Image (spheres, rainbow, N blue to C red):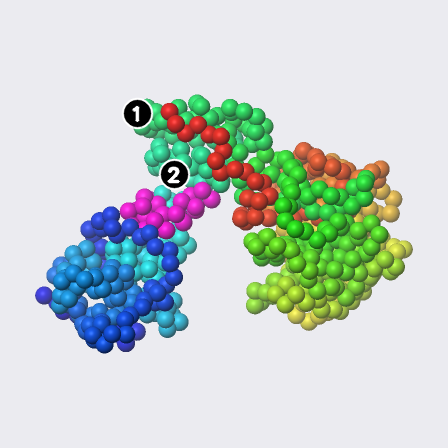
Amino acid sequence: MDETYYDVNNNNCSFISQTATSPPPNTAIDNTFGESPCKRARFSNDSNDLHWLNSNVRLILSNDEEMIISRRILSNYSNYFKCLFSSQFNDSKLDFYRIRIVNSTDLHYLLTIPRAFENGIKPELSLQRAIQLIEPAAYLQIDIALDYLTDVICQQLNYNNIIRIFHLSLLYHTHLAFRVWQAILNQFQMLVNSNEYLNLNEDELIFLLTDKNLNIRSQDEKRIVENWRRHHNSLNSANLAKFSLMNFARKVMPDSTKYEVIRNRQPRNAIIAFGGWSSRGVAQKIEIFNTRCDRWQTCTFNYEIPTIKRAYHGNEIVDDKLIIFGGFGGNSHYQTTLLFDLKKKDWKWGKNMHDCRCYVSSVQFKDSQGSTSIFACGGMNGTNRLNTVERYDVEKDMWTECSSMAFHRSDGANTLIGGKVMSVGGFDGRNFHSNAELYDPNTNQWQMLGRGMRTRRTGCSAVTIMDQVCLVVGGFNGSKRLDSAEMYDLREGIWHPMPLMHCGRSNYGISVIDNHIIHVAGGFDGQATTKENERLDLRVRHWQALPDLNEPKSALRLLHLNDHSFLDDLFNIPDDFDLVNEW
């Protein structure tokens, strides 16, 4: 019989990979979500208890392997041993215990994981090894190891392994099962495209179809049910057949405008139309574009909000903050900053800019340290067109003046290209610009771009497509509102013409999704503010007309919000939708 002494002060441990075999009993399923056991462990001050915990215990493990370990370290890291040693049963005082489903290699590794984190070391672990260790970690209730193993597994999920790992996690660790289930909801479209979803059982598929967060295209819902039923025999799909019969297309819903669906679902991403100028002055409605059904809907911020009646303003979402700065309120030109925390759902005033700025353009920049700041360029202070630039540090809530541009620009466009801020187009009070400048945040210097756009543009907008490519759309050239667009490739130094929009417009909102879908909405078409909405798919180089905004507006800002909990508040789709779940 092999015998191993475990030294609690030894941090240098090497292991031989070994697979745990026997499944744990039901009591091995983890249901604890508390703080780290390293913090949670508490010991009595009684000298007898301290002496008892400081003693060693002999563990007889699988294959008759033995380890001699301190009771204190076992109690500190394992809820299983903590309960065993602290109970009032006679077994608590035994000198040895037999644990048949855990081998010495796995136990040695599991006890080393929390020790490594205590010493600032992150253990390296493969997906296969993490899966092997889940069973003994769950059986012994080593929480800090379970948390780490869960992270390792969830970081390496893909459509090939996600369903198998979900079924395994149901046996051992409910927190892992929950996280894998969330990943299945998020990645379900990939499971559909690869037909891996056919490995789900009937109840699992029904639960997925009833979940509002299921990431699935409306046009695929009915096909998924039909394919699953064809793949499985009629006995195994009877409930699914009844469920789909009673729930498909029972009533008119936004998601069912084109296809039969089970229910309305939460979009994974959305576009928010914020602020702007309408026929009645500053726009009051905040609208959100549902990317599942291609429809704008009015949303209400049910929170105590300071005045947000702004047009020609700057708007950015950084981390969990919606940041609004500058703009025009009908009578006043603003230099104020408003911050809305998307998680805490509260507003506060930020520090003022150095200048009042309406017709301002802005862009986000992330430095080498991962800190995000916002550049606000040009604009108008109520009297003069500006060439000044300010940088907003989001963490410090501080505006700092930067080097000024060579040209005064109001209603210009900003974007990020090649790690530098590009300011392009705009109006200086006399001239409409076609030129562009590049700003290097590391040197605080501007330089002119070698070649200007093909067309003079003010009231235009720009988006970054890739690090080296940007797109500038629409605007006003001094004579008419433009329906043209241009793409600039920094590697070539050339502006390329792009397909024409359906509607010439200036001072509209723009947003990009997935680096190839460009949405534009609203603006001024030369006659009036418009509510027309369209998008460009760069893969097919084609503009597609979409349903209109709910009200015409110009000088608005479009913000893209992706996979964020705040989408629940904006769409307000109930979890308990009127589904028929009984048959």
Q: Residue furthest left?
A: 1
Q: CA distance from mark 2 to mark 1?
A: 21 Å
Near-viewer residue (262 or 573)? 573
Query: Considering only vertical position in the picture, is 399 above or below 522?
Result: below
Mark 1 Cα-neighbour bin, 10 Å: few <14, some 14–19, many ≥20: few
For image coordinates 29% across by 67% down, the residue present is 76
- Residue flagged by tag 1: what amino acid is it? Leu
User: The magenta stretch spans which residues?
Assistant: 164-186
Name the residue beneath numbered marker 1: 235
The kind of secondary structure the magenta stretch mainly shows is helix
Quadrant including the C terminus? top left
Instruction: Indicate the position of residue 161 as horizontal and vertical percent values.
Output: 36, 46
Instruction: Indicate the position of residue 111 as horizontal and vertical percent values.
Output: 28, 66
Mark 2 Cα-neighbour bin, 10 Å: few <14, some 14–19, many ≥20: some
Residue 112 seen in the current view: no
Near-viewer residue (24 or 508)? 24
Q: Residue furthest right?
A: 430
Which of discs 2 and 1 lies nearer the camera? The answer is 1
Quadrant including the N terminus? bottom left
Name the residue beneath numbered marker 2: 196
For image coordinates 79% across by 49% down, the residue present is 459
Label 1: state its secondary structure: helix
In-image side of 300 versus 51 (left or right): right
For image coordinates 26% across by 52% down, the residue present is 28
For image coordinates 46% across by 26% down, the residue present is 247
